[in-house]
Amino acid sequence: MGVQIREINVDDAELFVSLSKDIDASGFMLYDPDERKTTVEEQKKIIEGILADKKSTILVAEVDKKLIGFLAALGGKVNRNLHSAYLVLGVLEEYQGHGVATKLFTEIFNWAKEIEITRLGLTVIKNNNKAFNLYRKMGFVLEGEKINSLIINGEPVNEYYLYKLIN
């Protein structure tokens, strides 16, 4: 499987909206399945804003012109947190377990070093063991637990906070 990792561009907006909705269907993302209502035009503006911010990016994983995953890094906006970025990862289920996320993380770690981001953080739903184990494998450290941070199907759900320091 020839996976290409690259920075997103505005022309990817339609494919990215579709990818995001497909990944939301997993039940492990912030949005409920079918909740995301982002239009292609709105997504273009979001991508433009992220690309204009040198401390933020979205990397996409592509196979045969199809987007199969992404890793977004949203950088801090004020002096005290410009050294940090919050990450959001999504990979289509049929491509999980094939090293796609590892390639995305490797690229984001290189990007972070280049722009002097020294702290990466993310959250994961507590019962998403597959993602939690991946993040630990990639060097993230459990920082804490956010209690009742989400309501899923009417039930409170906890999330783990994880971080990785980039030297």
Image (cartoon, rainbow, N blue to C red):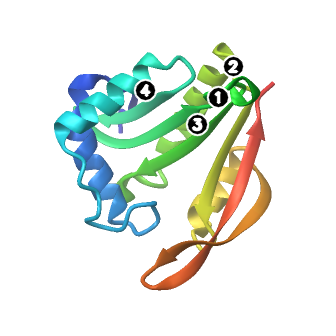
Numbered circles on residues, count: 4
Looking at marks 2 and 4 on the same chain, the residue that comes earlier in the sequence is marked by: 4
Q: Are marks 1 and 2 in contact (CB under 8 Å)?
A: yes
For mark 1, give the secondary structure.
helix
Which residue was labeled with disc 4?
50
Which residue was labeled with disc 1?
109
Which residue was labeled with disc 2?
113
Q: Left or right of 144: which side holds 37? A: left
* Residue 77 lies in quadrant: top right
Which residue was labeled with disc 3?
105
Q: Left or right of 63: which side holds 115? A: right
Looking at marks 1 and 4 on the same chain, the residue that comes earlier in the sequence is marked by: 4
- Name the residue at the bottom extreme: 154
50, above or below 95, in the image: above
Mark 4: which amino acid?
Ile
Q: Residue at x 74, y 46 (%)?
A: 163
Looking at marks 2 and 3 on the same chain, the residue that comes earlier in the sequence is marked by: 3
Q: Position of residue 23 (x, y in %)?
A: 35, 57
Q: Position of residue 65 (x, y in %)?
A: 22, 32
Q: Are marks 1 and 3 in contact (CB under 8 Å)?
A: yes
Looking at marks 3 and 4 on the same chain, the residue that comes earlier in the sequence is marked by: 4
Mark 3: which amino acid?
Phe
Mark 1: which amino acid?
Phe
For mark 2, give the secondary structure.
helix
Q: Position of residue 42 (x, y in %)?
A: 24, 37
- Name the residue at the front extreme: 78
